[in-house]
Amino acid sequence: MKSAENLPLNPSADDHAHTCCGHNHDASAQPAGASPARPSATQGSVFRIAAMDCAAEESEIRRALESVPGIRGLGFQLGARTLTIDAPDDVIPAALAAIRKAGFTPQPLGDRGDDEHAHGPSEGLWRMVLALALAIAAEAVAFFSPDTVVFKSLGMVLAAGAIGLAGFSTYRKGLAALMQARLNINALMTVAVTGAFLIGQWPEAAMVMALYAIAELIEGRAVDRARNAIKSLLALTPDTAEVRQPDGTWADQPAGAVPMAATVRVKPGGRIPLDGVVAAGVSAVNQAPVTGESIPVDKALGDPVFAGTINETGTLEITVTVAASNTTLARIIQAVEQAQGSRAPTQQFVDRFAAIYTPAVFIMAVLVAVLTPMLLDLTWTQALYKALVLLVIACPCALVIATPVTVVSGLAAAARRGILIKGGVYLEDAYKIKAVALDKTGTITEGKPQLVAREVLCADAPEPTVLAWAADLAGHSDHPVSKAIAQGLPAGTGQVADFTALPGRGVQAQVQGETLWLGNHRLMQEKGLATKALAELLAVHEAQGRTVTLLANAQEVLALFAVTDTIKDSSRDAIAQLRDLGVASVMLTGDNVSTANAIAKQAGIDQAHGNLLPEDKLAAIERMQAERGPTAMTGDGINDAPALARAHIGIAMGAAGTDTAMEAADIVIMNDDLRRIPDVIRLSRRTRNVLWQNIVVALGIKAAFLGMAVLGNASMWMAVFADMGASLLVVINGLRLLRGVSGNR
């Protein structure tokens, strides 16, 4: 059963301390391009640390700051490489000094350092090309020149220049790691290259560092594709909005400064800047960036619109309903950032494995250097060279990077389809789902029932009065069935007092001094008003798949109202796809059993349960999990929230869903299309396959080259190609998930 705690935006990474960290590996961090203005919930002074690439370096910085008194909190945003330090002004200098001592260069936000990450991409590439040219020159001098002091000195200078250009950052971070007795790729490369240079293998040392740096640059850019896959969402919302002024004129204002209730105008072809409702105009709006819908949706007076969507045909005037920081798009971005900050189960396994693997291979290298001269009759120089090759091969880069790149690619692919997955754990675990429980109204059906029959049952009460009472109670409820009743009846008296919602049963209120109830058959049974004749009357309507609501006072049932809802076309297709995937479907609804069975039969659902209160849905989920295994719950209402939270994976309908349901859920379907659920399961299965492909590739290549190194058949060149080649392979394989999630049954 899943944990119900909230996902941290910046989880601690202490258990990453021994993992690879030479590359831009934090694909699990927030996307590059995220606003530095909100690095975390922590408030304080913000600094850019250009060399802070991954969770291992976050851990190093945390350790460095542990000894600094007065720090109240730290906020890391690895995607933007920023650190927020919440501390008094007089503590900041000591904190910065501790960070510098750990081998990092913090700068006030907006400044740029001299680290290679601070330079533009083209400048970093040219430095790598120059380093490679110097390394090739050093190799040429060693191979073609006579063995004299002059040419040897020239070759060593060229090699040192290549190492300096390509490896300055690696050396700086590697020495800091070694001083703190930590083993990461920077420490391993520092030892290996320095050792090779000192034993006279300076051409190879230069070439290894240059190739390593170039491969690191290529790999970093490939990883950024996964990290930035969601970045395009940040550019969807326009920076300015055309706002109506008090004098009736229109003027552009920054979108972030537009207050709620203001009116903005969006012309054809423009992007909607803020969430709101249409105040004037008619148009078709392309909602694909937010909901994944491929067909534009017609919008008219009163219809909701989302920031970042595209107004296609007519001019719209929109009343702003939420601030720019809380739009649907902003919440999607925030949720994806939190999801990228969480670690999936496979990643946790890999991190634990790497924490043992790297020191173990380092110890093996030491033993090779010490024992092989005695056991295999090697010279000390040969033994040391063999040990240095082992160190380069030992880097667990490909293994560590395999999971976050794959998971973030999967999260981004889902977001592009209007599927918001709140964490890698849910993406990875969705393949386990054996059954899906579904709410009825608004989930399987359109959620827009219509009043199709009404009958006054009390001969002593005037029909207009009874209908007015029903309209009053229904008009104060936000339940879709109540809304349908209110819309299908004449206007009420408006004299409603002490209105109370009775979850799963109905509502209660005082109208013109009389206590009235509007609710289902269960409520009437609780009030002692149910009769055999009433049950027979209900059965007639329920057999037709109608939902029956009853109006009663303290003495008797006054009237009956029957509404019906249509099943979404997408629901039938979704249930069929789930069946193809071997996943059972079960409907859980507060409606009566007859209605539940009728709707389930029409939709092709395997099993249906009706007359369920919120606590009954919760109990049903627990039974399904015990009997069937991992179960997902899908719903859109407040009454679904407990079941959503308890299920292995909770899936909320985002377009019609309540905030409570979306907060309780682990996955949000932004366009309420149930076909996204089988999409999620297929994507999870693909993700799992890619994850294990990457792990097998990474470990297989490592094992092969470790064997070759022990047998003396591997050089440092081969070690670098093995390490970086494996890393590039797993990155490219993980990026395949960005291609999409549909059509892969």
Image (spheres, rainbow, N blue to C red):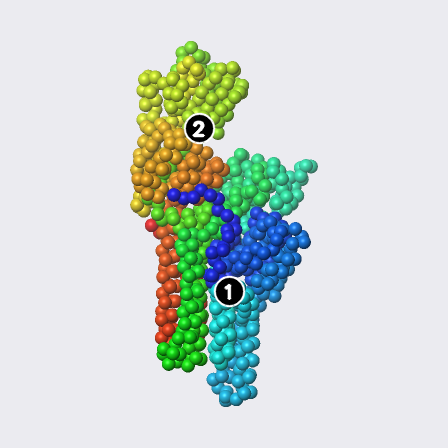
x then y, percent, for residue 425 = 42, 49
Q: Residues within 10 Å of mark 2 (few under 14, many from 20)?
A: few
Q: Residues within 10 Å of mark 1 (few under 14, many from 20)?
A: few
x then y, percent, for residue 302 = 53, 34
Marks 1 and 2, the one that precedes in the sequence: 1
Which quarter of the image is occupied by the N terminus?
top left
| Side (left or right) of 429 relative to 274 | left
Q: Is residue 558 visible to the viewer in this orientation of the structure?
A: yes
Which numbered disc, 1 or 2, marks the residue closer to the eye?
Answer: 1
Q: CA distance from mark 1 to mark 2?
A: 60 Å
Residue sitting nearer the eye, 235 or 184: 184
Q: Residue at x 41, y 21 (%)?
A: 550
Q: Residue at x 41, y 32 (%)?
A: 614
In the rendered structure, which amino acid carries the disc numbered 1?
Answer: Ala
| Side (left or right) of 544 relative to 190 | left
Residue at the spot of label 1: 181
Q: Residue furthest top?
A: 460
Position of 360 relative to 253 (above/below)? below
In the rendered structure, which amino acid carries the disc numbered 2?
Answer: Pro
Q: Residue at x 68, y 37 (%)?
A: 246
Q: Is residue 456 visible to the viewer in this orientation of the structure?
A: no
SS under mark 2: loop
Residue sitting nearer the eye, 356 or 335: 356
Residue 545: give its label: none
Where is residue 48, by image quadrant?
A: bottom right
Residue at the spot of label 2: 503
Position of 538 relative to 571 (above/below)? above
Q: How many marks?
A: 2
x then y, percent, for residue 266 = 58, 43
SS under mark 1: loop
